[in-house]
Image: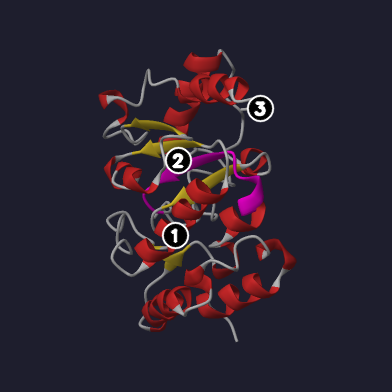
Amino acid sequence: MSGFHAALGAFLASPVSASWRELAVFRNGTAERVCAAVDAEVAAGQVVAPEPERFLAALALTPLDQVRVVILGQDPYPTPGHANGLAFSYVGPPPLPRSLVNIYKERAEDLRLAAPAGGDLSSWAKQGVLLLNTALTVREGATQAGSHLKLGWRAVTDEILSAASQQRPHVVFMLWGLPAQAKRGLVDESKHLVIASAHPSPLSARRGFFGSKPFSQTNEWLKREGQPTIDW
């Protein structure tokens, strides 16, 4: 058996899911129903990204009990071959996705660091940066951005965000773009920091993403809270 439903089962049976699997959406059938809906799209001929074995990569690489930063985007890259289960991350040949290019531009301006050669952000994830999208899948294709936002993922990712807010002590939530900013109410701002800005997409980056200094803001706040900083 293959597909997203099967991949969900494999994830929940794996030790890497230990800190996530007790969330209600993984116990009451909610996540299973969404995965079944995604599998139905695939059966009907749609090509969906990322691959089933990668769509929960953000949770697998960043356990709930290690979350220190959440970077929230909208949905995976719809360009064929771009999505890998970590929001904004890319593993492949040049050119890099344009949103990631803009993230690197802001990183360079903010921290005075040269842009990395590749787009793999798994090193961030392994430091406690949860690279999450509001939808975990998308139809591939140039016009398909947002195609799975109404498929049911909202209940899943809302609970993931709520769990990070409720169970972790001091987290920075970077909410990039309007769909991400709509989740602000899930964050307890009495103990967490929210950095809300425009999305790094070329369509919106100049409307508030550039100049937002999210990386230095994050490290300064973590340091004030007695937490280790992130090696961006």
In space, the residues marked 3 and 1 are separated at their CA atoms by: 27 Å
In space, the residues marked 1 and 2 are separated at their CA atoms by: 28 Å
Q: Nearer the viewer, residue 149 or 63?
A: 63
Image quadrant where residue 181 sits: top left
Residue with the most extreme front position: 190
In space, the residues marked 2 and 3 are separated at their CA atoms by: 22 Å
Specify how the rendered protein is coloured.
secondary structure
Quarter of the image with the C terminus is: top right
On residue 159, the disc is 1
Task: Find numbered disc 1 in the image and state the secondary structure of the residue it sits on.
Answer: helix
The residue beneath circle 2 is 97
Which contiguous range is marked in magenta? 62-75
Marks 2 and 3, the one that precedes in the sequence: 2
Marks 3 and 1, the one that precedes in the sequence: 1
On residue 208, the disc is none
Comparing labels 3 and 1, the label whose residue is closer to the camera: 1
Comparing labels 2 and 3, the label whose residue is closer to the camera: 3
Tell whether 186 sits left or right of 6.
left
Comparing labels 1 and 2, the label whose residue is closer to the camera: 1
Q: Which residue shows up at 36% across the image and 22% down it?
A: 210
In the depicted structure, whether residue 185 falls above or below residue 208: below
Q: Nearer the viewer, residue 46 or 15?
A: 15
On residue 231, the disc is 3
- Relative image position of residue 169 (x, y in whole percent): 57, 40
